[in-house]
Image (cartoon, helix red, strand yellow):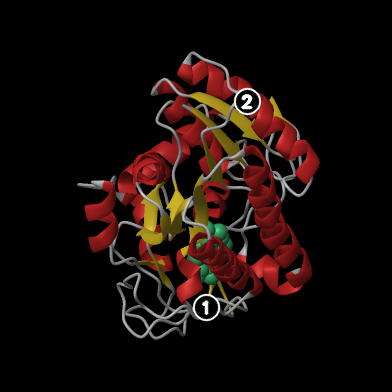
Amino acid sequence: MTIVLTGGCGFIGSHQAVALLEAGHDVVLVDDLSNARESVVDRIAEIAGRRPEFHATDVRDTEALTKVLAASGCDSIIHFAGLKHVSESMERAIDYLDVNLAGLTSVLKAADTTGVRRLVFSSSGSIYGPAERVPIPETAPVNPTNPYSRSKALCEQVLAQVCAVDPSWSVMSLRYFNPAGAHPSGLIGEDPTHLISNLVPVIMETVNGAFDSVPIFGTDFDTDDGTAVRDYIHVMDVVEAHAAALDVVKTTTGFEALNIGRGEGVSVRQLITAAGDVLDRPIPTVEHPRRTGDVAALAADTTRSKKRLGIHDYRGVDTIFRDAWRFRAGRTT
Ligand code: WQD
C-alpha cells in the first residue's frame, strides 16, 4: 500500500515511516519542516533501507496536498501534522486552532477530491481534561482544558461528522497519552526544532548538560507525591498501534477513537527518578508553579485498544530512557 504521512518528518511520523517501509509499504512524507529537520529523511532511509518520498508542504495548502495524494496513488493517510504543546497553546490559541483544524479540513478536502477514504488521526488523551477516574476509558466525557486539547477534540467532532454522513469513510482516531523514547538504532528520536518543552526531552537535555536542571511544574497536585501524573508510552509502541489501525480502517467504515497509552500513570518525580536510575546519574531539579492548562493526572484505560489493535504488551519506562538517551547522546546537532 501507499501511505501518506502528514507531519512525517516529526517525532512519531518519522518512526512510523521506518516501520511502514520495513513492512514493504510505499511511504510519502508531507511536512512543512516547522518542527523537524529534512535530514530525518536520510535517517529514515538509512534505517529502513528504502527511501520515502518527501514533499516540503504545509498541509493547509490543499492544492499542493491534493497533487501529492493524486500523484502517489495514496491508499491511506496518517495525519500527524499539527501543533502539540499544551503550555504553548495557551499563548497561541488561534494558531493552534488554525493549524490543527484547518490542517485537518484541508486533508479531508484533498482526500475527498482524490478518492482517499481511509484515515488514521493523531489525537490526544489530553482531550479528557480533569477526568473523574483514572485510568480513563474512551467512554469518558471529553472535557478539554486548553486550546491544544480543544483543537484535537474539535478535529474528532469533524471526523465523526464526516463519517456520519458518508459511509465510504473509515477513520481511526488514536488518543495518544505521552509518547516518548526513540528508535532503538539511536538514529531518530524526539528532536524538536521549534520548542523543547515535553518532560522526557527536557530530562535528556538536562542529562546532556544543555539545560541546568529539570523544572518541576507543580508540586501541589492531588497526586501521591504532588506532581502531575502522565502515561508515558514508547514511540515504537505508538507506531505499532498505528500500523494495526491502518489494517482496521481497511476493513471497517465509520469513526472510532482508541486510547494509546501504557495504562500506567507515572508522576513527574517518579519519571525523573527512573531516568536517573537508568542513566545512573543524578538529575538536578527545580520546583516551579504549575503550568497553565495542565491537569493532575492522565492515564489510559487500554482495554479497548488492546482488543481492537491486538496489542499484548508495552515497552517500559526504562526502555524509553535507554532509547531516548542513545539518540540524544549520539546526536551531533
Ligand atoms: C508532562 C508533565 C508537565 C516539562 C504531551 C504532549 C501532547 C500530547 C499529550 C500527544 C506535565 C510536566 C513537563 C518539564 C515538568 N501528546 N513537566 N517539567 O503536557 O502531558 O502533553 O502529551 O498528542 O502533544 O505535549 O506533556 O511532557 O509537556 O508534560 O514538570 O520541563 O510533565 O507540567 O505535568 P503533556 P509534557
Give how far across and how far down residue 84 sits, in percent: 61, 58
Q: Residue at x 32, y 80 (%)?
A: 224
Position of 123 relative to 205 (above/below) = below
Q: Nearer the viewer, residue 314 or 2?
A: 2
Q: Amino acid at mark 1?
A: Gly
In the image, what residue occupies the spot 57% across and 70% down? 149
Q: Is residue 250 left or right of residue 215?
A: left
Spatial separation of the CA atoms under disc 2 and disc 1:
47 Å
Asked if 158 appears above or below 171 in the picture, the reply is below
- Disc on res. 72: 2
Q: Position of residue 165 (x, y in %)?
A: 53, 64
Q: Is residue 236 visible?
A: no
Closer to the camera, 213 or 53? 53
Instruction: Decide which of tag 2 and tag 1 comes sooner along the chain.
Output: 2
Can you say whether 113 is above or below 216 in the image? above
**Assess mark 2: CB under 8 A from ligand 1?**
no
Query: Of helix, strand and loop, which one carries label 2?
Result: helix
- Number of residues whose C-alpha sits closer than 10 Å to that of mark 1, classed few (under 14), some (14–19) or many (20 or more): some
78 relative to 197 in the view: left or right: left
Q: Nearer the viewer, residue 95 or 252?
A: 252
In this view, the mark in front (2 or 1) = 2
Report which quarter residue 290 is drawn in: bottom right
Q: What residue sits right under mark 1 in the picture?
A: 218
Residue at 40% from the left image edge and 81% from the top image edge: 131
The amino acid type of the residue labelled 2 equals: Ser
| Secondary structure of residue under mark 1 | loop
Please say if the residues under marks 2 and 1 sit with CB atoms less than 8 Å apart.
no
Q: Is mark 1 within 8 Å of ligand 1?
A: yes
Q: Residue 92, position in %: x, y?
A: 76, 68
Q: Residues within 10 Å of mark 2 (few under 14, many from 20)?
A: some
